[in-house]
Amino acid sequence: MSTPQPEPIVIIAWIERAIDGTAAGQHLRGTIARVQGIPGVYLERVIADMDSPDGREPLTRKLHRLASLVLRTALAARRERVLVVRHHPLLLPALLYWRLRGGKIVSSVQGSLDDLANEYPRLGKSKLVRRISVASARSAHVLVAGAPVITDHIRHEMASRSTPVIPLANGVFVRDLASAADEPSPRDGDYVVFVGNLAAWQGIDVMARAVQHEAWPHGVPLVVVGDGVERRLLEGIPNVELLGRLPSREAAVWYAHATCALSMKKSIGSVAQHGYWPFKLIESAAVGVPIVCSDAKGMAEAAQSLGNGVVVPAEDEGACARAVRALVSEPERRAALAAAGRIGVQRFDWSSGAPTLLQAIQLAQGEPHQIDERP
């Protein structure tokens, strides 16, 4: 007879800045909610930087923060603890020490090796950095794929043969997003909203052309919540309102009262192979707003599954403009898409992933389980 495993004691560690409105911050808060929602699992502490001010971080401050978080993560190592981390190459020394101390590690991998090169252009393409990233992943007892579309990549390129890889999609706080509709609208009249990073893969150039296209509905502005290097493509366009980065709650209110949302992601770089995990579709479904989205890999499938999307070709600004005009002029269609999205989004609430995270924790502790391959 096998000896039953003790109830897990979990420590969560993030070394990326987990501030409000960032992907790392949203992921950390969702992971905390998942762990706290598992009966019999005790969350002992969270090692993270959740309070840094937004904006560019000075190099000296960044180096000090990273070193401090890695050291604190290593010093927390105990045989009877399970460490849940967001994968990062710099965590390798701490993870090796955890293994030395007999602790267990569940690491959530959020992107492919090519995404590392996109985020850190100078370092990410280095063979040494990529090897460190793989070594960091292989130091974990269990890997969790934060996006279903990269599960196979993680399994074949980052995991060792003996490391279980569990697909566990990142989610949203459905109830919090839905409640944003109860707050007053920040603007009168119809408007289209884009919320996110103004990066090349977001199709910012396509949106800039679409809003100036003759088919775009007259007098309906594109409200942009976010910032990034592609901001310059939108500056000076009369029908575009640039709000910059906003706290997540304010962004949700802009989302909730929009006539429709917009996401014209492009199949460039590694996503042409792996596809996107379409947060914007999930967020728009949660707030009850239809979305015009591109047919980039992963997007069309999610739009069909959620039921709230109108899919158009990724590089076609005319199709985008016409789809926006149709939604603006057809309130009954908007209402039907929104209603379908509210139903479809429930399985993407952070809380729905708690059983799968428990499975990963128990696998790390050595308990056999059948891995559920469903997103």
Image (cartoon, rainbow, N blue to C red):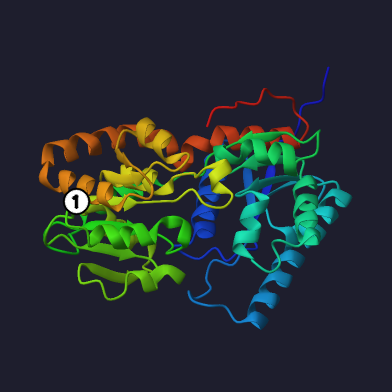
Q: Does 77 sit above or below residue 297?
A: below
Q: Residues within 10 Å of mark 1 (few under 14, many from 20)?
A: many
Label 1: which residue? 259
Front residue (pair 317, 263):
317
Q: Does 198 sit above or below residue 5?
A: below
In the orientation shown, which residue stands out farthest toward the top?
Answer: 1
* Residue under the image location 30 percent in, 71 percent down: 243
* Residue under the image location 73 percent in, 42 percent down: 157
Label 1 secondary element: loop
Residue 250 coordinates in the image, percent (x, y): 31, 63
Using the rendered image of the protein, determine whether residue 228 is visible from the camera's viewpoint. no
Q: Is residue 263 left or right of residue 105?
A: left
Number of marks in the rendered image: 1
Residue 340 coordinates in the image, percent (x, y): 27, 32
Residue 68 coordinates in the image, percent (x, y): 72, 71
* Residue under the image location 84 percent in, 49 percent down: 99
Front residue (pair 169, 5):
169
Residue 373 coordinates in the image, percent (x, y): 59, 27
Amino acid on which the number 1 mark rests in the picture = Thr
Q: Is residue 104 left or right of residue 38?
A: right
Q: Is residue 65 left or right of residue 33?
A: right
Using the rendered image of the protein, determine whether residue 283 is visible from the camera's viewpoint. yes
In the orientation shown, which residue stands out farthest toward the right?
Answer: 100
